[in-house]
Amino acid sequence: MDKEALFLKCVSFTTSVHRVTHELTKNAKSDSVTPVQYNMLEYITVSQPVTLSEISDCQHMSMPNTSRELKKLSEKKLIEKISDTEDRRKQYIRLTKDGETMMNESFACVESRFLQRIQNASKEDLADIDHALDILQTKLFY
Amino acid sequence: MDKEALFLKCVSFTTSVHRVTHELTKNAKSDSVTPVQYNMLEYITVSQPVTLSEISDCQHMSMPNTSRELKKLSEKKLIEKISDTEDRRKQYIRLTKDGETMMNESFACVESRFLQRIQNASKEDLADIDHALDILQTKLFY
DNA sequence: TGATTTTGTTATCAAATGATAAGTAAAAGA
DNA sequence: TCTTTTACTTATCATTTGATAACAAAATCA
């Protein structure tokens, strides 16, 4: 196995993943939030409740900028902060009802496009895809 | 096969791909260009020669903004414009020697990190990865 | 030939993002 | 108790990015 060739194949693969991700998510994102805010919401959605520091780490943003953007999301009533009773410095962030509604709509839109994309795949194709995802997730994109 | 479950698995997979891509490429990008400019250079690198309109389409940027950023890259001596002799409206963009050097360094850095990541993979693992990439590229991320 | 389309440019503006300094309050450690 | 560390905020500034209007030149079309 030529590792150099595998690298090039992998580069072209990730390019495809980025392109398809863009196609599936474009316009699925509500206009009321900026791209960075949407990414934060995505992370909060799957990881809530989560602290400001964790968002800062995972989204590669500075604390001040994270704080500012969370404040905006809070003003838009999409997230809420709940202070930890044990450590009163900490704030747990989670989606509000409005936030959940918004994210559900986005995810539903992306999912319907995803289903369109695999509508012509056979049972075997789907099994292949499922297996391939497992392989790459564990052996390459861990 | 539950398509809903496949969708969720796919979401988590693309998240991993984005995260790993970020890890592999962070700080590999020269400080002399902005993120958007780097993406343009990446595209030019693999697709050259390419026109301004094509960059605009593929990078989802407006013509004026594409023109502006290309002008900056040109001032930095990283790309050059060659006018088409047949259609004098068109300009073919390609990397200069400096541009190639810069991109080669970036790619080399990313590749070395990639090789580190798969250094412990067995022959069979590599074959599995290779096959999985083919499957996903043709059946999902086409 | 004259109108329209294509390809690209220049200028300008607003919004989004990133970086940094300075500060607060609570917790943890000595 | 006093100091240090952690978690977060506020304020400010520069840069990047996106959007739009107005333009120019070449090609195509009628």
Image (tube, coloured by chain):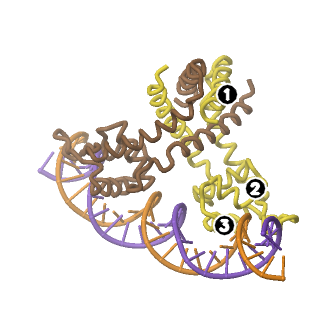
Chain colours: A yellow, B brown, C purple, D orange
Q: Which residue is mark 3?
A: A67
The numbered mark, 1 or 3, whose residue comes first in the sequence reads: 3
Q: Position of residue A44 (x, y in %)?
A: 72, 53
Q: Secondary structure at mark 1?
A: helix
Q: Which residue is mark 2?
A: A50
Q: Secondary structure at mark 3?
A: helix
Q: Nearer the viewer, residue A92 or B91?
A: A92
Q: Are marks 3 and 2 on the same chain?
A: yes
| In front of the other: A46 or A124 | A46
Q: Residues within 10 Å of mark 2 (few under 14, many from 20)?
A: some
The C terminus of chain A lies in which quarter of the figure? top right
Q: Which amino acid type is shown beneath numbered disc 1?
A: Asp
- Amino acid carrying label 3: it is Ser
Q: CA distance from mark 1 to mark 3?
A: 36 Å
B115 over C18 or under it: above or below:
above
Chain of the residue displaying label 1: A
Q: Residue at x 30, y 50 (%)?
A: B78
Secondary structure found at label 2: strand
Mark 3 vs 2, N-terminal side: 2
Circles 1 and 3 in contact, beta carbons < 8 Å = no
**Labels 1 and 3 positioned on one and the same chain:** yes
- In the rendered structure, which disc, 1 or 2, sits on the residue that comes first in sequence? 2
Q: Amino acid at mark 2?
A: Val
In three-dimensional space, the C-alpha distance between marks 1 and 2, rounded to whole angstroms, equals 27 Å
Q: Residues within 10 Å of mark 1 (few under 14, many from 20)?
A: some
- Is residue B4 shown above or below D16? above
Can you identify the residue that label 1 sits on? A134
* The quadrant where residue B8 appears: top right
Residue with the most extreme right position: A85
Choose between B88 and A38: the one closer to the eye: A38
